[in-house]
Image (tube, rainbow, N blue to C red):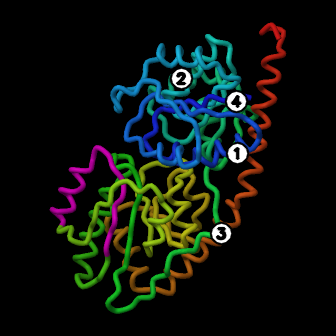
Amino acid sequence: MRILYLINSLNGGGAERPLPAVIGLMRACGHSVRVVALARKAGNAIAWLEAAGIDYHIVDDRDPERFASLWQAMAYVRANRPDLLWTSLTRATLFGQLIGRVLGIPVASWQHSAFLKPANRFLLRRTRNMSAFWVADSDFVARVTQRQLSVPPERICTWPLFEADAAVPPATPWGGEKDAVFHVGSLGRLEPEKNMELPIRAMAVIRERLPKARIHFSLCGNGSQMAYLKALAAEQGGGSISFEGFQPDPLAFCRRLHVYVQPSQFEGLCIAVHAAMQAGLPVIAPPVGAIPAIIRDGQNGFLLARPTPEALAERILHLYTNPGLCARTGQQARAGILEHYAKDRIETRGRTIIHRAEKLVRDWHHSPARGG
């Protein structure tokens, strides 16, 4: 079948990072897929698509920040009519649902996050039946989608958007050497919901409590809070904080660290946490989204029940001064991720969902109501 994969943008966030693996599996099942974006935005995902040989199109590329209109997207889909519209993120899903209804094309839709803006939740709750079925990126998001959008369980399935690779070596564990630097890092969009202010303020607490500690924090990502966070870091005496911009390979970045921090206020699956755990790092994060489902506090990571600078600083310092604990926790994290997110296990779940889409298209075309 011909699949048109409609997505908000090619920005390079958590919804775009898995595209090569997801579309690669669709193609392995014999289907042709084109990614169609409503906007370019930063365009960080383009390199991933091109490296994987994936066909893509930006509906309106005159202004990278501007989304194409519904009518532009409708015209494009009409001219390049697929057998199935597969949508990702709220704007693309709402557009895809309306286009599918007008043009008589079935729609399958992703849900990536446990958090929906009130207006988006209101709209999706009313259009939920315009998607033939929904796909969640984690069991947690599936449960939240059922509750928030009133989607019945039989119309939502889970395809975890992370595949672990045992062939990729882990990070070098922290050894506690006297002159070595303890590397802590975070990945994410520099937007308020990612709460990157928390680790910056935690670094100031660390300097107060243990001034001679050789701890460096690397903050990676771009976003509207870049200037504010840089100013905050400078105000806090941020010589031990560096801003490293967008990272095309999260796993490569994590392999340079000893500890990973995910300070988000809400999450879905959170690919960055999975990448850090695969790299053998202890992860420190608040218990939000699907994170408590993979982190067992004190065993393979640490959950911040109180996400305050003081609590985060205390946990980082505890790992810094206990290299054995740091190494053991990272080893447990890696072992669990390699077991639960093994490639063959994830691909089996993905193929099941693709087969469901195949049946949807067959039944759609042979439905008497559609003249099949």
Q: Residue at x 52, y 81 (%)?
A: 327
* Mark 1 residue element: helix
Q: Point out the residue furthest to the bottom here.
A: 178
Q: Which of 131 and 220 is in front in this view?
A: 220
Cα–Cα span, label 4 and label 2: 14 Å
Cα–Cα span, label 3 and label 4: 32 Å
Q: Earlier in the sequence, mark 3 or mark 2?
A: 2
The three-letter amino acid code for the residue at tag 4 is: Phe
What residue would you read off at disc 3?
166
* Mark 2 residue element: helix
* Mark 4 residue element: strand
Q: Which of marks 3 and 4 is nearer the N terminus?
A: 4
Q: Nearer the viewer, residue 369 or 22?
A: 22
Per the rendered image, the range of residues in magenta is 216-236
Left or right, 35 with respect to 204, comes to right
Q: Position of residue 323 (x, y in %)?
A: 46, 86
Q: Which of marks 1 and 2 is nearer the N terminus?
A: 1
What residue would you read off at disc 1?
25
Cα–Cα span, label 1 and label 2: 25 Å
Q: Which mark is residue 94?
A: 2
Q: Which of marks 4 and 1 is nearer the N terminus?
A: 1
Q: Tell me the mark number nearer the camera, choosing from 4 and 1.
A: 1
What residue would you read off at disc 4?
133
**Label 1 packing within 10 angstroms: few (<14), some (14-19), many (20+):** some
Q: Earlier in the sequence, mark 4 or mark 2?
A: 2
